[in-house]
Image (tube, rainbow, N blue to C red):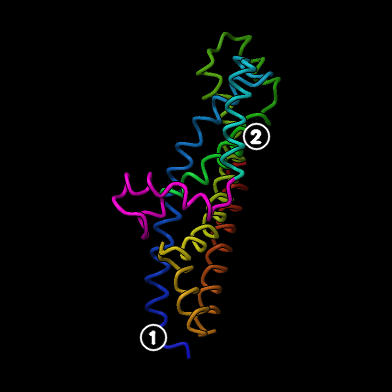
């Protein structure tokens, strides 16, 4: 039932899932930090309040957060093909995964920044700190544990998204579960892929919790 050939296929698929999740997490954090900083700066209580810019950027972020992932994958096929040269496969799936995670990461980082004690910001201003210095030494330093927790949450969410990506040829554990487990009526594949995903998510969350406790 649970033979070596099955586990070979699952471990190969696990590697594909990790490729999708890790790269999309990295890109989404880098790209999501940009709107997060702009939202924090231009918020009514930010360092450089600008209501029109904040409202427009907030609207764009909310629009992208509203798209179901499976629809977003289809909509960005032209962009995916332009970047990776193809519309399906593990590498191609990184593009829609990243795009879907950027607005989520932006909101997570923005929320972490806005939780920083305003008294610390005012104290830094009173000492003549510039906006860059305030962001580096106050916002980022104080919000880092919360940002890290958000990144872990993003990674876990992307595991689920990558499994959905298997429905349209992205590869990974979702693809194995659908083709071998669901379509071929092999329940052992569904059980094994689910077990691997559960163990991985628990491991990521556990490691994240320990790091969060240590740096907090």
Which numbered dot is residue 164?
none
Residue at (42% x, 56% y) in the render: 20
Q: Which residue is mark 1?
A: 4
Q: Nearer the viewer, residue 68 or 151?
A: 68
Circle 2 is placed at which residue position? 111
174 is higher (above) or lower (below) than 150: below
Bounds of the magenta segment: 67-94
Percent of width and height locating residue 152 = 56, 50
**Corner quadrant of residue 79:** top left
Q: Quick one: SS at disc 1?
A: helix
In this view, 191 is above or below 139? below
Q: Which is nearer the eye, 36 or 56?
A: 56
**Which residue is outermost to the bottom?**
1
Near mark 1 (Cα within 10 A), the count class, few <14, some 14-19 or many ≥20, is few
- Report the quarter where the C terminus lies: top right
Which residue is at a point 59% across and 59% down the rendered structure image? 206
- Between discs 1 and 2, the one toward the N terminus: 1
Q: Main secondary structure of the magenta part?
A: helix
């Amino acid at each position: 039932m649970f033979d070596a050939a099955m586990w070979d296929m699952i471990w190969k698929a696990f590697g594909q899932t990790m490729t999708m999740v890790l790269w999309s997490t990295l890109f989404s954090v880098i790209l999501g930090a940009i709107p997060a900083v702009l939202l924090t700066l231009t918020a009514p209580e930010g360092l450089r309040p600008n209501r029109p810019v904040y409202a427009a950027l907030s609207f764009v972020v909310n629009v992208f957060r509203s798209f179901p992932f499976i629809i977003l994958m289809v909509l960005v096929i032209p962009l995916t093909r332009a970047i990776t040269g193809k519309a399906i496969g593990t590498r191609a799936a990184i593009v829609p995964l990243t795009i879907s995670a950027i607005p989520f990461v932006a909101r997570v980082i923005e929320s972490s920044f806005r939780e920083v004690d305003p008294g610390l910001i005012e104290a830094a201003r009173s000492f003549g700190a510039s906006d860059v210095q305030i962001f580096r030494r106050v916002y980022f330093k104080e919000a880092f544990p919360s940002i890290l927790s958000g990144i872990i949450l993003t990674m876990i969410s992307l595991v689920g998204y990558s499994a959905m990506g298997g429905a349209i040829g992205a590869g990974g554990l979702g693809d194995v579960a659908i083709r071998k487990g669901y379509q071929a009526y092999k329940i052992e594949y569904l059980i094994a892929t689910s077990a691997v995903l559960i163990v991985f998510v628990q491991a990521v969350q556990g490691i994240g919790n320990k790091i969060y406790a240590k740096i907090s």
